[in-house]
Image (cartoon, rainbow, N blue to C red):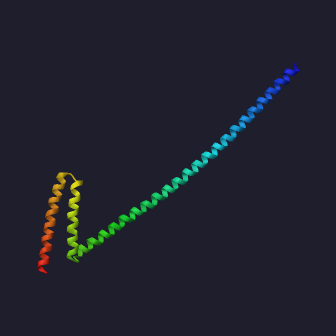
Amino acid sequence: MAEMLTDLLQNIYKRIAQLGSSIQQLNDSLNSLNQNIEQKISNLTEKLEEFSNEISITQTKHVDAVKEIGNITTKELKVIQEGLGLDALTNLIDKLEDFAKLSEGILNQDTVNLLLSEAIDSVKSLKESVKEEEVME
């Protein structure tokens, strides 16, 4: 009977040792998983930071480009406004004609017809004014 109790206790001890070993392996696996998760989160944070910087840089470039376009447009309008030559008016007329051609494909037909008739009348009157000024010179 004592032998049976000894065997039973030894079996219980072995099972407890196996359970302890399994728990240790599980602990190691969990630690490894936590490290892996931390690394993934760190990588994701870095990527998000890089993405945020790229957005900021791109946004700044777009704003600068729009500002530059606005400044150039303002200068061109001042040249025309001050009347520093017929070349600016001729250039404006050409650009308005190009704009009228481009808008045909973009706008609906009713709007295009209305805008084109107004633009053509304006262009004709500007051309006539330019021709009259050239004849006067």
Q: How many marks?
A: 0
16 left or right of 69? right
Vertical relation: 101 (above or below) 30: below
Residue 133, x across and y down, in percent:
14, 77
Q: Residue at x 46, y 59 (%)?
A: 56
Q: Residue at x 69, y 39 (%)?
A: 27
Residue 31, given in percent of the width and then of the height, sits at 67, 43
Query: Residue 10 at x, y = what percent?
Result: 82, 27
Q: Is residue 20 above or below residue 34?
A: above
Q: Quadrant of the N terminus?
A: top right
Image height of 128 relative to 102, above or below: below
- Answer left or right for 28 relative to 39: right
Relative height, residue 135 to residue 48 (above, below):
below
Is 92 situated left or right of 26 in this image?
left
Q: Residue at x 15, y 61 (%)?
A: 118
Q: Position of residue 116 (x, y in %)?
A: 17, 59
Indicate the quadrant containing the C terminus: top left, top right, bottom left or bottom right. Answer: bottom left
Q: Is residue 127 left or right of residue 15?
A: left
Task: Tell me what residue is drawn at x 22 percent, y 63 percent.
Answer: 98
Task: Point out the residue furthest to the bottom here.
Answer: 137
Q: Quadrant of residue 74?
A: bottom left
